[in-house]
Image (cartoon, rainbow, N blue to C red):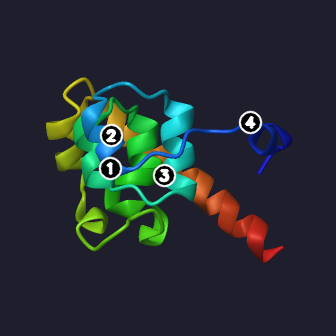
Amino acid sequence: MTTNELEKTYEKLDDSDLRQNKFAYDLETLVWNIKYSCISLRVLSRYQRLTPYVCAKYVVFGGKNGQYADCTEDAWLCTGDILNRQPHITLAEMLEAHAIADLEDLDEDQYKVK
């Protein structure tokens, strides 16, 4: 966590917030809640506007090793689900975002080993 992440506070969301306030939350708040709160990635992908990167990094298959999934069904979300739920995102954008997220995951794994 960076100093800025420690200093900034975010609204803690639950699934009803995501449903009731469609497309209302900024990406920083959503990502913070994916990481530190227990929100459903299925609900998130249906009710909030996401970027290809956020989907590839955190939502598809619940992120690396399913770490962001709040249940088994969240870990089943695939790129096709994202394309259906986030019509502004193209397959090409998702493929590019997956490549970036995969490289980041590799870098994080190598950093942990050292």
Q: Which residue is mark 4?
A: 8
| Drawn side of residue 65 relative to residue 42, left or right | right
- Labels 2 & 4 near each other (Cβ < 8 A): no
Residue carrying label 2: 18
In this rendered view, identify the residue nearer to me: 22 or 103.
22
Q: Earlier in the sequence, mark 3 or mark 4?
A: 4
Give the spatial CA distance, label 3 vs label 1.
11 Å
| Disc 1 + disc 2, Cβ < 8 Å | yes
Number of the front mark, 2 or 3: 2
Mark 3 and 4 residues: CB-CB less than 8 Å, in contact? no
Identify the disc placed on residue 15. Answer: 1
Question: Label 1 neighbourhood size at 10 Å, few (<14), some (14-19), many (20+)?
Answer: some
- The residue depicted at 47 percent of the width and 50 percent of the height is 57
Alpha carbon separation for disc pair 2 and 3: 12 Å
Residue 105: x %, y % from top left: 58, 59
Q: Are the residues tagged 3 and 1 within 8 Å (C-beta)?
A: no
Give the Cα separation between the discs numbered 1 and 2: 5 Å
Mark 4 or mark 1: name the one nearer the start of the chain.
4
Q: Residues within 10 Å of mark 4 (few under 14, many from 20)?
A: few
- Above/below status of 58 relative to 4: below
Q: Quadrant of residue 46?
A: top left
Badge 2 amino acid: Leu
Q: Mark 3 = which residue?
A: 34
* Amino acid type of the residue that numbered disc 3 sits on in the rendered structure: Ile
Disc 3 element? helix
Instruction: Identify the residue at image location x=85%, y=42%.
Output: 3
Q: Secondary structure at mark 2?
A: helix
N-terminal label among 3 and 1: 1
